[in-house]
Image (spheres, helix red, strand yellow):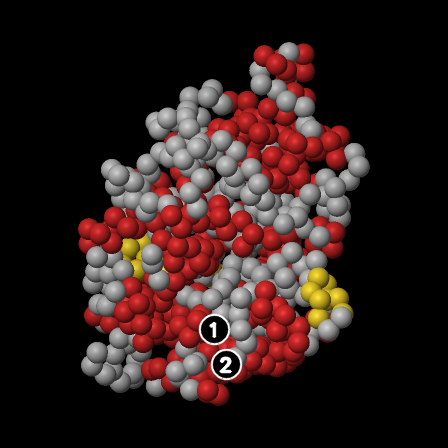
Amino acid sequence: MAPLDDSENKKPAEMMDIRGPDGDPLEIPRLACDAMAESKPYPAYPEHNLKLGFPGELIDNWQEVAIAKMGELAKKNRAFQVYLDACVKCGACTDKCHYFLGSGDPKNMPVARQDLLRSVYRRYYTFAGKYFPWLVGARDLTKEVLDEWYAYYHQCSQCRRCSVFCPYGIDTAEISMAAREIMDSVGLGDKYCNEIIGKVKDVGNNLGLQEKALAATLEGLEEDIEDDTGISVRIPLDEKGADILLVTPSADFFAEPHIEGLIGYAKVFHEAGVSWTLSSYASEAANFGMFIGSYENMRDVSLRIRKAAEDLGVKRIIFGECGHAWRVAYSFLNTLAGPFDFLDPNYPVPQHILEFTWNEIQKGTLKLDKSRNDHIRLTYHDSCNVARASRMGDKPGGQFEIPRNVLKAVCNHYYDMDRDTIMESTVCCGGGGGLLTDEIMDIRVKGAGPRMKALKQVTDDFGVTHMAAICAICKTQFSKVMPKYGYGMDSILSVHQLVSNAIILGGQEVEEDAAPQGDAAAAEAKQ
Amino acid sequence: MSYEVNGQTVEHDEEGYITNLSDWSEDLAKVIAEQEGIEMTDEHWAVVNFLRDYYEEYQIAPAVRVLIKAIKKQMGPEIGNNKHMYELFPYGPAKQACKIAGLPKPTGCV
């Protein structure tokens, strides 16, 4: 471990060394005590909080209510109580958080982050803490402690990398979700998450994209596909009687490279010959209710998907490329919004778009020309919620294998990053868990450091030019932070963008050297 | 938190997006642009005007792809491309140009 000295760690992110002297992407930084104490997202406005059922602003008796809420959560959620009680301070987690590795702030060590809440729990809910608080590190819940919670529980992306290495399996994400739930319950919400959940309730998606705009966007994309390929490929909206409802993050209708992924899904469905539709009512896969630990809000958002599936009379539900949505879908959807006995029992409920595409590739339905991705040397970033909180296919590890299988089927040049930074040990993009907001860009850039260092290794060793991901947050985060580490903003790609590049549609006339323009430009920018 | 323009006060949020969309004027756009370090040219105005027209019709900003397609049609591929849009609005044509055009910030995973 580096010496305890914070004087040299005040370098801005732009000046950070991309790769430590020993080339280790997980190199432990010098400690920088309280370096990130002022990193806080904007608090929610009263109207944002009220819409979600929380007090508009910090209530007068917040201390009393917060302590009671903590007790209620510990009683209701046994795992939460075990996580608070079980830690033996072994230290295994200390160097596992990307925000700690990027910032050096010891309060970003997972054990320290847990202790911000655990110390208060001890004070009010354990014998020793009630009578001998000074002996067991128990603290009163003061305004300073609340402020500290607000700062550091918004520096946890709930990626759960630390929990993989904890011998007791303590899940910091659960503690961070509980902390946010407690803060919401006293009127201290964060604007980014709470405003967005309100938009889903009003309009049906995080963006606030209404039906008319969504329909116009999809029509425009159909035109683009036809211009590019000469083939008419549909992106249906609200089509009753379709077999498949596709639920995808609304970023897929708006941002780059997300939209290229949506085009990829449409081409795969087209070639597979299935009938499918999007829904304007459930035009969002993301479910920020999870980030703020609110079961009620998570359920409200999930029920929209159920209602859309019933109203449209579909037989199957497939989720697009969204990391935490797949956790909610795979792990919680049936509890939140089930039973889904009205769907076709021959298919998993729900299914991931990559499971669908991989099946089609195995069946030979898709005509793929890998050489159309030859201008790309690719690696893959495992998104945290897919990697550690879900599965794909019918075998353990399917969530690691299936995306790689698909990528290798559409791309000739594929290289994995350092094994300690992928699969179940994947490092977070730095923007997950409700942190994808610009006022905390500093911690976002720092948190991306370990991933960027691992990427730099494969760039140096194998000439990797691009990284693919299957999460809307990861894609947006990387397109913002990669330029700080010397990569072009278009070095991050959607997995189905690569599929889209490689697919030759039935009836499509193919020119020689028809590499897609956008990616060619990206490759040039990189050189 | 407010802008001063022609002796009038226009409220904005923490990030500089105006609170009341009907407060927008071309003079205000120049003030916001100046604070963003942007000098408004015809190309900037073409983007801002398109964003405002689109918003009026759809109550939301267009996807960057839609914006680029429209500018390409209007001003040609030299100007209507992703790289040039980021030269005009370094913090992104969606967020930064929306701020100058007096539109709300796009929210979500974007």
What secondary structure is found at the residue carrying circle 2? helix
Q: Measure how far apart labels 2 and 1 are at the Cα level.
A: 8 Å
Quarter-of-image position of residue A147: top right
Quarter holding the N terminus of chain A is top left
Residues at circles 2 and 1 in contact by the CB criterion of under 8 Å = yes
For label 1, the residue is B88
Q: Residue furthest right?
A: A60
Q: Is residue A39 rendered to the left or right of residue A91? A: right
Looking at the rendered structure, the kind of residue marked 2 is: Glu
What secondary structure is found at the residue carrying circle 1? helix
Residue B42 or residue A168, whichever sits in front: B42
For label 2, the residue is B43
Q: Residue at x 63, y 50 (%)?
A: A42
Q: Residue at x 61, y 58 (%)?
A: B15
Residue A118 or residue A76, whichever sits in front: A118
Vertical comparison of A81 with B106: above or below: above
Q: Is residue A519 rendered to the left or right of residue A53? A: left
Quarter-of-image position of residue A103: top left
Chain label for disc 1: B
Quarter-of-image position of residue A352: bottom left
Residue B16 or residue A425, whichever sits in front: B16
Chain label for disc 2: B
Quarter holding the C terminus of chain A is bottom left
